[in-house]
Image (tube, rainbow, N blue to C red):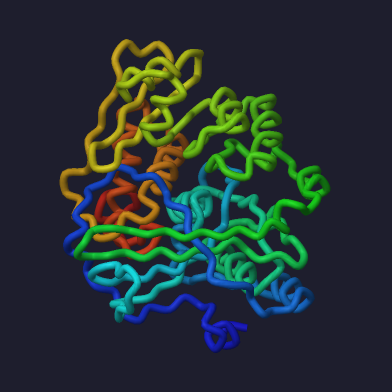
Amino acid sequence: LLSNLHRSGLASRRLVHPPFAKMQRCCASTSRHAYLALGRSGGSVVPARRAHQQWDVHLAGFAGLRQVRGMRVLAMGNTIIDTVLTMPRIPTDDKVWIDSIESFVGGQGANAAQCMARLGLEVSWLSRLGDDDWSIRACGHFKEMGINTEHCILVPRAQTMSACVTIGTECMSRCCFMHKDPTLFEYDIKPHMDRIDLGKFDAVYTDGHQTDLALPVVKAALARGLHVVADIEVLDDDTRQLAELATEIIAPAKTVKELADVADPGTAALALADRPGRTVIATLGELGSYGATHGDRVPVHVPAHPECKATDTLGAGDAFHAGFMVAIARKMPTLKDRMHFATSVAAALCETPGPVASVEALRRYGCLPPAS
């Protein structure tokens, strides 16, 4: 199967990875971008489904990190196959040789879920995928990361969400193109949702997308007294409802300010932390983050990590969310402690090619114990 994927060009491969030296954005977090798809896989439906059942690989390098599991998390959201192209400048109506092409299993929630698993949480992933070669790759990758995929919903005759992002390393610009197959959202998901046992989890995380999946789970989780941590990038009726329900909101400052109808991000976080147990964090990329817990009189501000030498900020906001979940699991005593830890995880991500922080970078920032 792996050799077939390599021949078809679907397996992740790196041609060149230049050191993005000019993209020095020391981010505590950034908004995750949505990206575009490159076309339908030619794989047939039945072989793809059979391959999902057969693919059960494990990376030996992660074994030591998996021996002790932490908080049990049901993470929900988008799975996107990202193809990332880098070049000095993004052309307009012209041709250009690119410096590198890389492919990643990404998506806002998927990035966060992978980082949580790498940091030792016990993660299950709930997402729609097509019944295609891209979903085979995605589920195989999640299993390699130690993520439980039993709640992934494979939609027959649909294409997995995918994306293309072009990065100009000299002009410091990024273009994102995104595609989602409407067939993914026409499929009846209720039988799959009915099989989810929230008694097996300690917390729920949502990236704020696919709210028809997220809202029923969030309501049931709250009835059980579970943590519900939500990212919200785009405001509509469903995401506003999600924001009202979540025990913890970690969202771009623009979203937090709009929800609170307040111009200052710290004041907006204070205004939204309006009930016991409620925490709100507004993220501002290289300007750090502002947070508040119910009862606070002044917001907490944590700047971007001063030692971060950012080379690639793709997924930094998702890494911040993962770090905050891990900080909750590790029972860090104060909001500032949790935000500092989340910022360190995001900094590790910014020094890692791709949307998930490497083990080495996480160790450099003290997020994982040193190698024995």
88 or 28, nearer to the observer: 88
- Rendered location of residue 22, percent (x, y): 17, 61
Near-viewer residue (56 or 130): 130
Quadrant housing residue 3: bottom right
Residue 26, percent from left and from top? 22, 48
On screen, 159 above or below 113? below
- Residue 184 sits in which quadrant? bottom right
Tell me the residue at 47%/53% (across/down): 34
- Viewed as shown, does residue 222 lie left or right of 156? left
Q: How many numbered marks does the figure carry?
A: 0
Residue lying at 57% horizontally and 44% vertically, measured from the top left: 209
Residue appearing at x 53%, y 43% in the figure: 207
Compared to residue 304, the image places residue 282 above or below, namely: above
Left or right: where 134 falls relative to 50: left
Residue 231 in view in this figure:
no
Quadrant housing the N terminus: bottom right
Q: Residue at x 68, y 42 (%)?
A: 213
Looking at the image, which residue sits at the far front? 93
Q: Where's the C terminus, which quadrant?
A: bottom left
Residue 311 lies in quadrant: bottom left
Q: In the visual, does 247 lie left or right of 159?
A: left
Q: Position of residue 282 (x, y in %)?
A: 36, 31
Indicate the position of residue 171 as horizontal and vertical percent values. Answer: 21, 61
Residue located farthest toward the right when viewing the structure as drawn: 191
Q: Say whether residue 80 is visible.
A: yes
- Up/down of 166 relative to 110, above or below: below
